[in-house]
Amino acid sequence: MARLTMKFGGTSVGSSAAIRQVAAIIGDHLAQGHELAIVVSAMAGVTDMLLESASAAAAGGKNRYVAINAAIAEKHHAVIDALIASETAREATHYLVDELLQGQLELCEAVRILGEATPRIADALVSYGERLSSRVITAVLAADGLRAQQVDSSEFVVTDNVFQNADPLWDETESRIVDRLLPEIENGVTPIITGFIGATPDGTLTTLGRGGSDFSAAIFAACLDSDELVIWTDVDGVMTTDPRLDERARVLPYVSYQEIGELAFYGAKVLHPKTVQPIISRDIPLRVRNTFNPTLAGTVVGSRAHASETVIKAVTGIRDVSMLTVSGPGMLGVPGIAGRTFLATANAGASILMISQASSEQSFCFTVVDLLAQSVKEAVEAELRREILHNDIDSVDVLSDIVIITVVGSGMRGTPGVAGRVFSLLGDHRINVLAIAQGSSECSISFIVAEADLERAVGELHTLALETAENDRVNGMASPY
Ligand code: ASP
Ligand code: MG
């Protein structure tokens, strides 16, 4: 018997058929004698609809938000009708949904009158997605005879007041979960918890950011001291690369916490980047599994970093980025140019994905998303106006048709020759590398190539990752607890 925290994402709870599948998975695990805490997302699409209702209301678009409210109602009522046989239970659940959505409509009214949806009100509005899905799923499980109980995570996850991107206050959160939720679970109750939502100490609703239910689940897994955190999603696991870039892509049996962090950052959108943060220190393994293919073991994420023969686990490519180069003869030995450039970039609202400078100090380059490249260029040029005027710095160049490729593998720490192998391979295939960066975590190497070379470069490097996946499979790295 194990204590598991399981999270079901938006697609996994996105239709009656999907929810039927979720109920079967939960029922199976309970039948095996496991203790469960379940965290759920909003039904697929509902969070976007709620955000749209907020902006429609702020713009005075009453017809629009009324229509959205009705569409959300319809989605949930359809699930209730399909999955709950008893008429009394069905009526009671329809009523719960209508009552909540009445509140959502009133909030939209308030936003329309104010003419503005502040981040605080947007959080309150968007919270309805998980509040609805958790209630409907609980009713479905209860109809199956399971002792499920709906739980609003705002009662447990205490956060700061950074609306739309809140972080938990750990001590208070943990003591609430341990004191009030754990005993219920030990009594055989299965809580069905809203993902994504928290509340400030004075009870104002917050959210943990888009995709934040993964993070919610990790918070509960950590505070409940679960044996495993299972993220049920709609893919088979973490892949060696994006199957759209190379059809040989396959599921990795095992990746380390560090590797998944790099992968989440560099474009493999399987998990919210904060997900591993709560579980690392307690060494709780995480498993990514497919709700629609539940016989597969998925990918295990844990603390073991190991050097296998090829050490490269995965290859990712990020498109839609631009490289900005600041160069000039007068930069040598002048402190502060990079600092001012990066500050100007931040002030233009862009985050930097990769930085590289050669020690000649004649130039450095960095990448931002395409969308912001022009405004970053202008901001940096304005900041360095004086240096440009004195010809100490040439202008700031923008190169747009480029991509960032990242190879990830924590086994490269202390393993000589990995970078050599990566770049020889590219050289052998005549792929030109424009810039290179390796973090001191030594867990990934990123570099920039022309967009036209993306598929070829990923394909070649991916061959190395496929070897690692095969080795890990043979060595049994995926064996669960
Ligand atoms: N429903 C939220 C979102 O779509 C949180 C989540 O699903 O993780 O962003
Ligand atoms: Mg997600």
Image: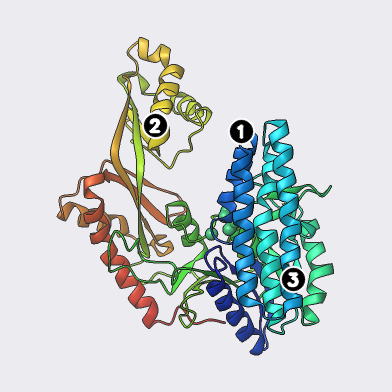
Q: Which mark is residue 91?
A: 3
Q: Closer to the camera: disc 1 or disc 2? A: 1
* Badge 1 amino acid: Ala
Above or below: residue 404 compared with residue 236: above
Q: Image quadrant for the N terminus?
A: bottom right
Quick one: 56 or 262, which is closer to the camera? 56
Q: Residue at x 34, y 16 (%)?
A: 392
Q: Which residue is mark 2?
A: 373
Task: Count all numbered tags in the image, as a single digit.
Answer: 3
- Give how far across and how far down residue 367 sits, in percent: 38, 38
Quarter, ligand 1? bottom right
Q: Closer to the camera: disc 2 or disc 3? A: 3
Dot 2: within a 10 Å radius of its alpha carbon, few (fewer than 14), some, or many (20 or more) residues?
A: many
Horizontal relation, residue 430 to residue 400: left or right: left
Is the residue marked 2 within 8 Å of ligand 1, measured from its CB? no
- Give how far across and how far down residue 31 sits, in percent: 65, 89
